[in-house]
Image: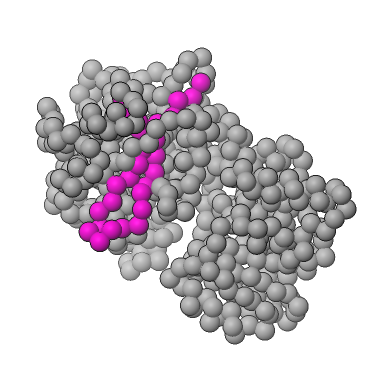
Amino acid sequence: MEKKQHIAIFTTASLPWLTGTAVNPLFRSVYLAKDGKRDFYPAKFAKDKGSILPVGDISEIIPDREADIAVLEEPEHLTWYHHGKRWKTKFRLVVGIIHTNYLEYVKREKNGTLQAFLLKYLNNWVVGIYCHKVIRLSGATQDYSDSIICNVHGVNPKFLDIGKKKREQQKNGEKAFTKGAYFIGKMIWSKGYKELLKLLRVHQKELGGLEVDLVGSGEDSDAVKKAAEKLEIKVRVHPARDHADPEFHDYKLFINPSTTDVVCTTTAEALAMGKIVVCANHTSNDFFRQFPNCWTFNDGKEFVELIQKALVSEPAQLTDAQIHDLSWEAATERFLKAAELNVPYERKLSRSTSNYMSTSLTLQERMEDASAFVHHVASGMEISRRIFGAIPDTLEPDEMQCKELGITNTPKKQGRGSPHSLQPDEAQRKELGTTSTPGKQAQDEAPRKDATTNTPGKQAQAN
């Protein structure tokens, strides 16, 4: 890029949550800038959705003079109930990154088919009116018009370091991998445990002698343990721990039959550590096919064959190019290319115009403005917000959130939206060592007793 650009990354999760939407946007901001500040935007935990939703107009976190590029991690999630300035109007470029296939989760709920049908059109609507570009991590996500499929995630460098040590052992003729097979992930049936235990149960005679360690914690932990105890195959169940823990270094085989992930982070980590990965022939694993240690199966017969082969084989040593492809440096390169941040981009919606129904040159733009205006009106009324599942009284941050986040309680000059400015006050800016307000990055923590939480922001500068 010829000149410095301000990139504000907004996401729906942050540490201490260890989900992909908490960890990966944080790495993206670090590798885009190697620097930056974080703020928290007001949000509340939605118990029925198991996730955190923004409160108020979170685009206000970024002052207009610094509003250049916005990256919305899970843009549909961030804009379902957005009421405030239109993202496309405020920012020169808005890039949406699709992390999750919400349709698959909704289908498992009561009246799931109908809910998924409605959610599909809602997602298409809000993503279309608020994002200039859409990047899907894999083909396992909902399709969007003119979207690009590109894995813009990498692995934590510590996994590459582990893999480097294993390659050195292999080159020296040492036995680098002394343990057998394992699987790690949040212990809920939908995260691959159901598929794995079924495969092991159906083929336990062919896989005699196989031992598998399952590592994770979750609401289905007890059920998973009971199901494992019924197998003839020796399956040990352990509580969750960090995948980079030395306990995992010596395993040779990572088994992941899940078809619910979009791009499985633990699969990428296992490959980075030099292990063989046996996973389903599924679109979520398309990115991993380029690596020689990624073996995919279509059915139970192939699953058994690959497991047997893995137990008597040594993992291939990755080339420097393959190692680079797993890194965050490569992921950032892919992101910059997919988002076309090196290409001059002209704002079509002027900041001098109103937020909605702005003067447009084409019929398509006029229709999009009208559609955005309808969403703005609907998201500004409490009754319509509740009909579509918003948390009650989340149109604006409450007094406690304003106090905790240092938000100035200043009425807006226009519109009927939130009367609060989401920009940090003087004391918070001084504490951050900045005269301006950083953007947003990730979601805070598990719900407190009052089901209220605050979500951080992150601003990155890329050269």
Q: Is residue 450 magenta?
A: yes
Task: Specify whether residue 358 is painted magenta.
Answer: no
Residue 338, can we see it? no
Question: What secondary structure is the stretch in magenta mostly built from?
Answer: loop
Please state if 134 lies on the left or on the right of 196 as rendered.
left
Compare residues 62 and 376 and report the one nearer the observer: 62
Residue ID at (31%, 58%)? 447
Residues rendered magenta in the picture: 436-463
Query: Which residue occupies 58% across, 38% down?
Result: 328
Numbered label tally: 0
Of residue 292 and residue 359, the one placed in the foreground of this image is 292
Horizontal side of 313 relative to 343 (left or right) equals: right
The image position of residue 323, as x and y in percent, is 70, 41
Q: Position of residue 133 (x, y in %)?
A: 43, 33
Vertical side of 251 occupied by 156: above or below: above
Residue 401 showing in the rendered view: yes
Picture coordinates of residue 450 (x, y %)?
22, 59
The residue at the point 60 percent across, 34 percent down is 329
